[in-house]
Amino acid sequence: MTSITTYQKRLCSVGQNRPNSGLKRILTIVINQLAIAVSMVIALIGCASVPTEGPHYLQQNTAIPADYYDVSITTHDGQQLRATVFQPVLKPGQTAPLVIHSHGFGIFRMSGPISVYGQLVFSGEAALQVWKAGYWVVSYDQRGHGDSSDINRLMSPQHEVIDLSTVIDWSLENLVRISRDPSGDPLIGTLGESYSGGAMLLNSRNEPRIDAMIPITTWYDFPASLAPNTVPKSGWLTTLLMVSNTLHPGSMDPIINRSYWDARDGELGPEIEDYLTQRSPKSYCSDYTQVSADTLLIQGFRDVAFPINEALGNKACLEQSGRDVRLIGTQGGHLLPFTQWSFPTPGYEIEPVVHCGNQTLELTQVVVDWLDEKLKGITGKADHIPTLCLTQDYQRGIVLSHVQRGGRTFTVPPSEIRSGFTGFFEAPLWALERMLGWFTPTDRSPTLATHNNSGTLRPAFTPLYVAQQPQNMVGIPLFRGHLASQEADPMVFLGVAVKRARGRYYELVSDQVTPLRGAGDHQVEMMAISTHLEPGDTVGTWLFGYHNQYRFSHSGWFMNATLEGLIQLPLLDAEPKRVSSGNQMKH
């Protein structure tokens, strides 16, 4: 790319950063951190007023260089959104498609090539590559975040959702040299994770100008994703509010902070539940018949904030439009700090490379290829992207035609939890067990009878099935059963685990547990899981009395509960058929 010239002096808003792997990645982080420190000094010295219009030279059809600059965009209700425009190299008379990018909850936009988003967060890395591939990219701060004004209303349809259309309006009016299709409609894409992914999904049902979307690790049913089966995910709720209130003090809608303390006590409450329902794509699913965008969903199996189930809900709604909708199920996503490992950013990580059957995909290139086909009209550029790719670990993935719900049925005999400490010590025990596994002989023919179905300090593992040959277990388990307890409000956490033949350690599949609350009968769709089984791997249920994902949501330290019933496991008996990328709809 050509050297950068700046349309204006940089503002007093500076990010940090992220790279690839190994020593090179670490060195890149160190170098970029130094560059950030220098840029912060320069920014603080050279603060300037922020223009509300694009450069006047864009009105001329002359050649323009690559550049990036900050602007201020006025919303429909008079608030100011701060944005950074990434201007592509254009020849005389040339235009380029527009991509709108934004950020996750509690953070801020990509303010430059050397920034938190440009180097450390997948959507920013991808947006940077999109810019270099010849697109306009506008990255903006959501309300109550970064340098934008107003409060954070957690994606209000009357505020943050409309703001996306406002940013599109401003871009078309001020950047001028934006590509259009033969009918004169502008060619526009959207890209962003989590919070901003929700913005584009909620906006797209009323915004016909968006032609391509890439929502990453976002939600479908807000109340159910934050409090499945009415049990608040207090681990993530605490983390998100702590980050947002630290980086943006005083910017939160009061109902959010107030409701957090109710959630700490184990309740959502009708006020916040209604508030979240209004912000859920699920609530507007019937409107998605009119969506005009082709959508590439990216969601993580190990994401314990918004699991793959959320992407499947969004996929079903979007498919009503008849558009091209595809899903890549990664491993990473929202990874809970102090519970799940992520590098170099604690709390969030999307792996740069995924495996889909026999092919390996670099995700940033996948983003560019998707936009090249949908916005630049390069026929076949996205043909290699499967309709449905589901990773099983960081080295393996399969291509399917659909995600299996349920499967082979197994009886779960009574599994007993004898204390609220059951699962509390799993973090250190997991590391110890993995280390001891290096010295433990592989057992390819274990028997189910050798296992115990109760737990006092460790979760209760109930073995159900031993793999006899290489096999995939991918999909959504279904559970129907009965929880018995003397507690007034018992809560337990049910997962699917594998005791590996190699190493004999227990592995909670995809790090997912499903909470069950209240004595009595339960019938639930569990969190989606994905793994590969080798001969001798033993599959079973794993029952916790405590789990760090729900660290303040449990029945207390002295409890006793028993769970029994039927579980359907998504065991795929045959090697899945390799399917093509399917629908190839064009503009």
Image (cartoon, rainbow, N blue to C red):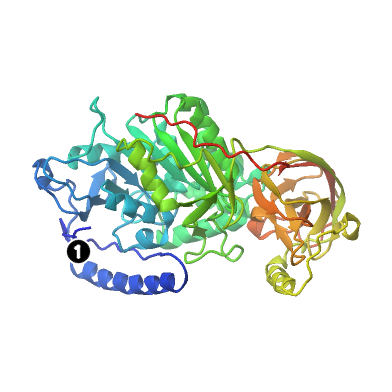
Residue toward you, 251 or 139 = 139
Question: Does residue 245 sit above or below 385 in this rendering?
Answer: below
Question: Does residue 11 sit above or below 226 in this rendering?
Answer: below
Question: Does residue 344 sit above or below 563 in this rendering?
Answer: below
**Whole-percent x and y of residue 583?**
47, 31
Residue toward you, 424 or 311 = 311
Left or right: 58, with 131 as reference point: left
Question: Does residue 345 sit above or below 142 in this rendering?
Answer: below
Using the rendered view, name the quadrant where residue 497 is placed. bottom right
Left or right: 398, with 293 as reference point: right
Q: Can residue 546 be seen in this view?
A: yes
Quarter of the image that includes the C terminus:
top left
**Whole-percent x and y of residue 250?**
41, 56
Residue toward you, 227 or 438 = 438
**Whole-percent x and y of residue 523?**
76, 37
Residue at image position (77%, 64%) is 421
Left or right: 435, with 10 as reference point: right
Q: What residue type is labelled 1?
A: Cys
**Whole-percent x and y of residue 167?**
29, 41
**Residue assigned mark 1:** 47
Q: Can residue 153 be seen in this view?
A: no
Using the rendered view, name the quadrant where residue 10 is placed. bottom left
Residue at image position (12%, 40%) is 93
Q: Tell me the SS state at disc 1.
A: loop
Quarter of the image that includes the N terminus:
bottom left
- Disc 1 packing (10 Å; few <14; some 14–19; many ≥20): some
Residue at image position (57%, 65%) is 341
